[in-house]
Structure formats: structure tokens, C-alpha cells
Amino acid sequence: MISIKDLHKSYSIGNSSLHVLKGINFEVEKGELVAIMGSSGSGKSTLLNILGMLDVADEGDYILDQVPIKNLNETKAAKYRNQFLGFVFQSFNLINYKTALENVSLPLYYQGIKRKERQEIAMDYLDKVGLKEWSTHLPSELSGGQKQRVAIARALASKPKVLLADEPTGALDSTTSYEVMDLIQKINEEGNTILVVTHEEDIAQMCKRIVRLKDGVIIEDKKINQVLATSHV
Amino acid sequence: MFSRDRWSEIFETISKNKLRTFLSGFTVALGIFIFIILFGLGNGLKNTFQEFFLDDASNAIFLYPGRTSMPFKGFKANRRIEFKNDDLEDIKQNFTLFTEYITPRISRSALTKYKNESNTYSTRAVAPGHQFVEKTIIMKGRYLNQTDIDERRKSAVIGRLVAKDLFKDEDPIGKYIDVGSSAFKVIGVFQDEGGDNEERNIYIPYTTRQLLEKSTDRVDQIVVTFPKELGHAGAVAFETSLKKYFKDKKSIDPRDPNGIYIQNLTDDLKRSQQFAVVLQLIVSIVGLGTLIAGIIGISNIMVFVVKERTKELGIRKAIGATPKSVIQMILQESIFITTLSGYLGLFLGIVVLKNIGLRLEDYFIKNPFIDMGTAIAATVILIVFGAIAGYIPAKRAARIKPIVALRDE
């Protein structure tokens, strides 16, 4: 599903340049649930942003579902993001003046789906994350866990090939975190490919594979025995 | 542009961001409103000015007889010069190309009575051409005509206020009034833009006046109007040759500054036109200044709006909005708001201008107005600049990477 080879990325800070990713190689198969771990500054968020086409690599190849991702202009990147990817952010990034339902249906709007159909699909996904009766609420009226579940529903609504989650539990308490991870595990069981960036060991243990980054290189990549989130609740 | 889905997305955004919508709408509406009010008031000032200075025909030359101050051709100095009816004929024949209308004017003051009402009014004995000299407007009946002159009829055209004083609500046409002990038939009522005093005049045929004054053929004044195409220089030349002609005819020393006085309105006209140009300039500068202030206002608001939405735009881009759709959304929204509020301001401005119009005459502002063309052009300019002012930051916002926009708090 995802294949990256020899990925490099530097940021220039004033006159000096910071080499964040120093040659990353890895593959992700369809249906995997991968945790990308590392301390802050290890380059894990940068890697996720490049995978999410929110940022571009300086060097290296990135192939997503047999489509080489290169020479992207903003319009093309927007189309790929819309077709291939779903995002879940640490800070939820819901549009604050739109209701839960409208937030979930927004990616479908950019896919050009008609309003009525959009709302039906969005309602299905809200139901899936257990927030059907909250559909008319604004983000400010929802708890952190609920917001993240709306964000997950939004990410799923466009039927992405890969779901990218950047510290999805970073802003949540542990009980809520486990609920969110439980949801992510269930979505994964349905055959979705999911990448989770985290620095919490217990969250990483709930995935099926852990990739550890340190100073811009992969230091460990192993499959693990998944811990079910439900066992914590 | 006309997709229903996009419009509903825009209406949603507008209705859920009321403060933002209000701010940008208010700026445009206020800008247009102030522009229309100031421009209208400026026009009102111009109207007052025109009323003050341009009431009478501006293409007129007034000739007054005087007394000579130099002996000439055997005549002594201090001789009284008089105009006669044949002078009118001579002007007509010798200056055919230069004269439009020609009329004598003999002014007298007389006690005028109708039934129990009486008052003293000034009567002006004139020829039909006088109507064009004074720009007299007939409200009822008719003005003097050539038959009145030829048959020396006792016809009178009375001013609006004369009619009001003497006749109250009665219809004056066809009634007889007593002017200085002779009965005159009222044939018309007139109004005059020149104000109340002008409307307290009574016009009668000059031949009738001459008959009443023991059949003289003397006239007090002669007024000649010339075609406007003559221009200022032509009018001055006409004046000079008129003066020369009469000095010759009346045997006055060409160097004598007295004897005949000529007043040429074209000089006044030139002066007042220059003043009008300056007034127009002031009005235009005020209008332009307001418009520029409005443009700056809407530009600031648009920059602020886009800045405020940076994060939202980042989110939209992360979930699949193309830069084009982002720009389109912002532009369509801003044009929609500015158009709506622009025309609201336009409408309000015109309504207010209409309503305050009558109350400002004491402050030298008469009938303030703005022509629709100018008002709509100003509105369109503001909308276009609002769109440009929105486009530049929108384009920048659409270009920044979503990751940067998402970090924006």
C-alpha cells in the first residue's frame, strides 16, 4: 500500500539547516495498523506529514497504492489527499462553526457528492463512531473524546486508502484514549490501513507493528502482539 | 460559480460567522452611504449657488441711458440721453445676427387693487422677449404677446405672490385689477426662480405704459439677449459695437465714459462659472476621498478575514480542498457580502438624502441629489476593490502548505 525509499527532509532554520529525515525506507501492507514511535524531534511527525502530502520530501520515492507521489502541485496534492487519505490530528482540527454532521460531510463536499447523499453518508459514519445523536452539535459542545471521534468519522467518510493519525490521543485522558484506540482497532479490523504517530508506549502496543525512529532514521521495525484496547476499559 | 451546493456552503458560512459578515458588510455599506450623502450635499450646495447667481439669462446685455459728461458736436455737457422705440428697431436691423430677443423695460411702482385687497407692486412694462431674459415661468394663462404690444392692450401678467396676496384662492385669470387707477385684465400668473421679490412683479406691455404716460415713445432700459454660441469673446465684441453704435447715434463723445451704460452679464457668468468649477472640484475631491477611505476599509477587513480563517483553510485543504476552490470560496463570499451591503448602503443613502433634502435649505443646501450613474459606479468600484483586496490574501492563504496553516492558532 505504502512504499517509501530513501526519504530525506531538511528544514532551514535561519542560516543553518536541520536534517530531520535521513534516509527512511519502509513498506506498509494493506490492512496494517502501524505505530510510528519516537521522542520529540525524532522526525515522526515530519514523516507522517510527508506521507499525508501535507509536506514534501527533498529526496526519495513515495509510492501510494501504486501511484508515485511526486512533483505535486497544490491542486494535485489536494485531489490525492481527498481520494487516498484520511487525517486525524492531535488537536482535532474540526471547523468550529460547523456541526458534527457538517464537519464529517465536508470531505464529501470536496469530492463533489450531492448534499443529500453527503449527509446520509456522514450520518452513517457518525453512527459508526457512536455520535449519531450528537450530529447537530458544534465542536464546542463536544468533549475531547467526542471531538476526536467526529474527526475519525470525517477521516473515514471519504473512504481513504490510508488513515493517518498524528498523536490521536495526545490531548485526551487515558480512559478516553483507550476508547479512541478501541475505535481505531475496530476500523482496522474492517480492513483499513492505519498509521498512528505516538510517543505513548501503551498506545503503540495496541497496534500490530511498531516502527521506532531516532534522529531521523529507523532504529527498529517489528511486528508485535496487539493489546486490545477493550482490555483496559 | 452557480452551483447550488457552493452557494449553500457560502450561505452557511456567512450565517454562522455573523460578526465577520457584519464587519465587512458594514464597511462597504457605510462607505457608500457616506459617499452618497457627501456627494449629494455637495450637489445641493452647487444648486444653491446656481439659484443665487444664474437665475436670469446669462446671455443678456443691459443698456441704460445716462447723462453726458463731455460736450460734443455742439451739444453741451450734462445732456440727458434717452432711449426711444426706434432704438429697438435699429438694434434689430443693424445687429440681426447678434440679437436673439430684444425688449425695453420701463419700471414703475403702483398701488394695485382687487376688490378689498390692495398693495404696492412694481410694474415692468416690457416686450414678449422679456420672458426669456428673466426666465419667467408661466404657471397659468399666458405671457404677453405681440398683439398685446401692437394693440396696446391693458393686459397684465402677475407674479405668484401678487396673485396670492390679492386673489387668495380665487382664479385671477380674466379678472380685472386696478393698477395705478387703470384697469388691467390678468392674462397670466408666473413664477420665478429668482425668489420672492421677483414674484411680486407685474408685467404689462410697454406700449400700454407709454400710452398711459401721455403717448411718449421713451423707454428706460433696453435688454438684448444674444445667441449663446457667441461665447464670451463674441459677447464682449457685441457689447463694444453696440456702445459705439449708440454713442454715434446719440451724438456722444466716443471718449465720454458716461452717457450710456452697458452691463454685460457674460462677465458675471464667466466669474460664476469659475466658482462653479471650484465647487465641483471640491465635491469631487470629497467624493473621491470617501471612496478611497472605503476601499482602504474594505481591504483591511478582507486581510483580517482571511487571516482569521487561515486555520480553517488549512483544515479544508487537508481534507481535499484545492487552492482554486479556496480562492473561489473567499471571493464569492466577499463579493456576495459587499454587493448586498453596497446596494443596501446605496439605497439607504438615497433615502436619507431625499428626506433631509428639504430641511437643509436654510443652510444653503438645496435639493441635494446624486445621479444614479455616479452612485452605482461608486458602489461597483467598492465591490471590485473589495474583491481585489480579498483575492490577494486569499491567494496567499491558498498557497501556504496546509501543515503551516494547521499550526496557526
Image (cartoon, grey):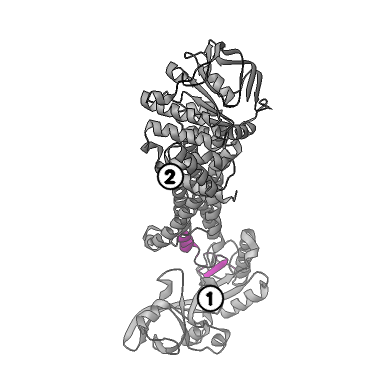
Asked if residue B344 shows in the view, the reply is: yes
Q: Quadrant of the N terminus of chain A?
A: top right
The spot of residue A90 in percent (x, y) is: 45, 26
Circle 2: element type: helix
Q: Is residue B173 above or below residue A218?
A: below
Segment colored magenta: B47-75
Amino acid at dot 1: Gln
Pointer 1 chain: B
**Residue pointed to by mark 2:** B16
In front: label 2 or label 1: 2
Asked if residue B381 shows in the view, the reply is: no
**Residue pointed to by mark 1:** B131
Amino acid at dot 2: Lys
The spot of residue A27 in percent (x, y) is: 62, 19
Q: Is residue B51 above or below residue A171?
A: below
Q: What separation in Å lies between label 2 and label 1 (alpha carbons)?
A: 66 Å
> For the point 42% across and 34% down, which residue is it?
A147
Q: Earlier in the sequence, mark 2 or mark 1?
A: 2
Circle 1: element type: helix
User: In this orientation, which residue lies closer to the viewer: A4 or B173?
Assistant: A4
Residue B62 in the magenta stretch? The answer is: yes
Residue B347 in the magenta stretch? The answer is: no
Q: To which quarter of the image does residue B21 belong?
A: top left
Pointer 2 chain: B
User: In this orientation, which residue lies closer to the viewer: B209 or A175?
Assistant: A175
**Which residue is most to the left?**
B116
> For the point 42% across and 23% down, which residue is it?
A170
The spot of residue A191 in percent (x, y) is: 56, 30
Q: Is residue A199 above or below residue A65?
A: above
User: In this orientation, which residue lies closer to the viewer: A6 or B346?
Assistant: A6
The spot of residue B391 in percent (x, y) is: 56, 39
